[in-house]
Structure formats: structure tokens, C-alpha cells
Amino acid sequence: MTAAYDDQNIFAKILRGEIPCHKVHEDEQTLAFMDIMPIVDGHCLVIPKAPARNIFDVGPESLATLVKAAQLVSKAACKAFGADGHVLRLHSEAAGGQEVFHIHFHVLPMKTGVPVRPRAMADHALLAEHAGLIRAAF
């Protein structure tokens, strides 16, 4: 069984406007923004605005809306970065690799022969530039 949702997680704080982010897409139910430790150019995250810890406790309607938003953002990110392929990741619980306990998809536009990088804090000017490229690709 999973633990209860913690409304003090970093994504909940981003949703409340307490922490800034580099937005790429927003609608009534979802928010997409750049990952601050990208492993590829264009690495962004898509989250629901409704609180849910992970796949085990998200409502089916909220999950469906999240998947639709992830598809939309994925298409734009791949177009913006000329990707040859794509990875959509979802981690649940620490044993599954989840680090922030608010359900989220990682959108990873991939290029043939370009490996993922180690996670490291990115320059905010570069993240802002990348967010602009993705927004322009919608």
C-alpha cells in the first residue's frame, strides 16, 4: 500500500505558485514544465493539477486526462527537438524510481546515437529557451 499524498511536495508547491517553473503547457487539469535536471534536451514533466501520489491512487479520469496531456506535450517536444524517437516514463514509489511523490510523466525526446546524460542541475536560461521551443511547436 502507498503512503498518503503529501501536499508539501515540490510539484504541489509549483501548482500553488510557491516555486517557479519553466512552463511548456497548461490547461484546466494539467501542467507541463521543464525538468530542472534534464537527461536529454527537451526533458519535461507533465502533472495533473489534482493531488495524486502515483499510479496506485490516481483516479482513472484524472489519469486519462494526464495521458492525453502527455501525448500533446510529447508531440510538441519531439517536433521542437527534431527527435527520432521518444520515451514516456512513469515511476511509482521509491522502489520504482519515483523521487517526487506527485504522479508525473517524464517526456524524453530522443535522438539516435545520443545517450541520456547524468542528472545534473541545468542552467535556467537554457531551460527557458527549451521551454520556448516546445511552446512554439504546439
Image (spheres, grey):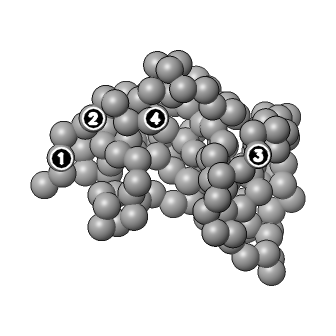
Dot placed on the residue nearer the N-terminal end, 4 or 1: 1
Give the alpha-carbon distance from disc 3 to disc 2, as whole Å.
28 Å
Give the alpha-carbon distance from disc 1 to disc 2, as whole Å.
9 Å
Residue name at image x 18 percent, y 46 percent: 3
Q: In what quadrant of the picture does the C terminus appear?
A: top right
Tag 2: residue type?
Asp
Q: Which residue is mark 3?
A: 123
Q: Which residue is mark 2?
A: 6
Q: Which residue is mark 1?
A: 3
The nearer-to-camera label among 3 and 4 is 3
Q: Which residue is mark 4?
A: 11
SS of the residue under disc 3: loop
Mark 3–mark 1 CB contact (< 8 Å): no
Residue name at image x 63 percent, y 31 percent: 21
Residue placed farthest to the bottom in the image? 113
Packing grade of label 1 (10 A; few <14, some 14-19, many >=20) is few
Observer able to see residue 97? yes
Give the alpha-carbon distance from disc 3 to disc 1, as whole Å.
33 Å
Packing grade of label 4 (10 A; few <14, some 14-19, many >=20) is many
Tag 4: residue type?
Phe
SS of the residue under disc 4: helix
Mark 1–mark 2 CB contact (< 8 Å): yes
Residue name at image x 34 percent, y 30 percent: 8
Tag 3: residue type?
Asp
Packing grade of label 2 (10 A; few <14, some 14-19, many >=20) is some
Tag 1: residue type?
Ala
Whether residue 27 is situated above or below residue 73 in the rendered picture: above
Give the alpha-carbon distance from disc 3 to disc 4, as whole Å.
19 Å
Residue 80 % position (x, y): 84, 48
